[in-house]
Image (cartoon, grey):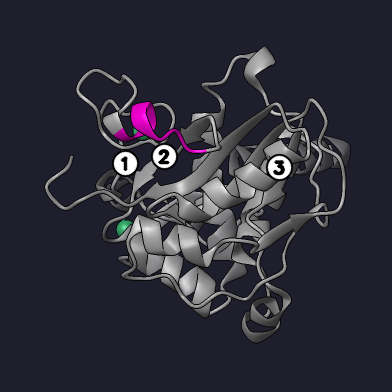
Amino acid sequence: MKNFYNRLKFNHIKVYQQLQQWLGTSLPCVLCDAPATAPNHAHLALCAHCIDVLPWYHAPRCPQCALPTVSGTLCGICLQHAPAFDHTLTPFRYAYPLDRLLHQFKYHQQLSLGHLLANSLLSPLSTLTENARPEVVMAMPMHRNRVQARGFNHALELAKQVQQQWQIPLDIAGCTRVLDTPTQAGMDMKTRTRNLRGAFATQRSWQGQHVMVVDDVMTTGASMHAVAKVLKQAGASRVTALVLARTLKSDEP
Ligand SMILES: [Zn+2]
Ligand SMILES: [Zn+2]
């Protein structure tokens, strides 16, 4: 009889553990404090409602720079002055409340928020066919002065998640930012491009490689263009940009 109860107890715990694993852990939502279900290893979660109201980017867009186009064809800018990167993948528009979450992650060093955000990067990646999959992933390089000031490179934290989830090798030091250029907010594309001349350098050959560059936000695409140009000059065959959010003009979808 004792054995029977022991067995029952054991099974009960096991069933409970399995259920918990299946249901996940209950945590308060980062944005509204409502109960949210997260995978068991997570420290932060969003509730179903807040996930719904995130600025998901569904509209048809230019495959190269991710600006909206009527039927998902190349935009006029890419047709006339194609950037050095070939393709842009992004799950979000840069808008509320994603901008707040990103700010918390970048300036308050909330690394687990970075993990939560990085999970959203995996959905556009899953749209790639096997042979369109990049061979190597890298983060948008940050000048060492800025890494020191901030404590970490936020883009590298996002890129690490991509490496872990998709088993794409991560290159950490192959391309670096050698010039600490001024903050680019408010500058137009031409000024940004001029400022970024000579900002990036690569120490290795990228011969024939399809490289994926991860960053948090693409605003004008000038930084991505500058990095991609350096990678292509060093032999890269293709550069895919994977960004968490794309800045659009306010009247765009
Ligand atoms: Zn919520
Ligand atoms: Zn375009």
Residue 34's label in the rendered image is: none
Residue 56's label in the rendered image is: 1
Judge depth for marks 3 and 2 and give the one in front: 3
| Residue drawn at 30 percent across, 53 percent down | 50
**The N terminus: image quadrant:** top right
Q: Is residue 55 magenta?
A: no
Task: Specify the quarter for ligand 1.
Answer: bottom left
Task: Check disc 3 and report the residue beneath it.
Answer: 231
The numbered mark, 3 or 2, whose residue comes first in the sequence reads: 2
| Residue drawn at 40 percent across, 35 percent down | 81
Q: Nearer the viewer, residue 36 or 86?
A: 86
| Residue drawn at 41 percent across, 39 percent down | 91
Evaluate if marks 2 and 1 touch, with contact meaning CB atoms under 8 Å apart.
yes
From the viewer's perspective, tell me whether residue 8 is left or right of residue 2. left
Question: Disc 2 and disc 1: Cα gap in Å?
Answer: 6 Å
Q: Amino acid at mark 1?
A: Trp
Q: Nearer the viewer, residue 127 or 87?
A: 87
Q: Is residue 79 magenta?
A: yes
Task: Check disc 2 and report the residue beneath it.
Answer: 91
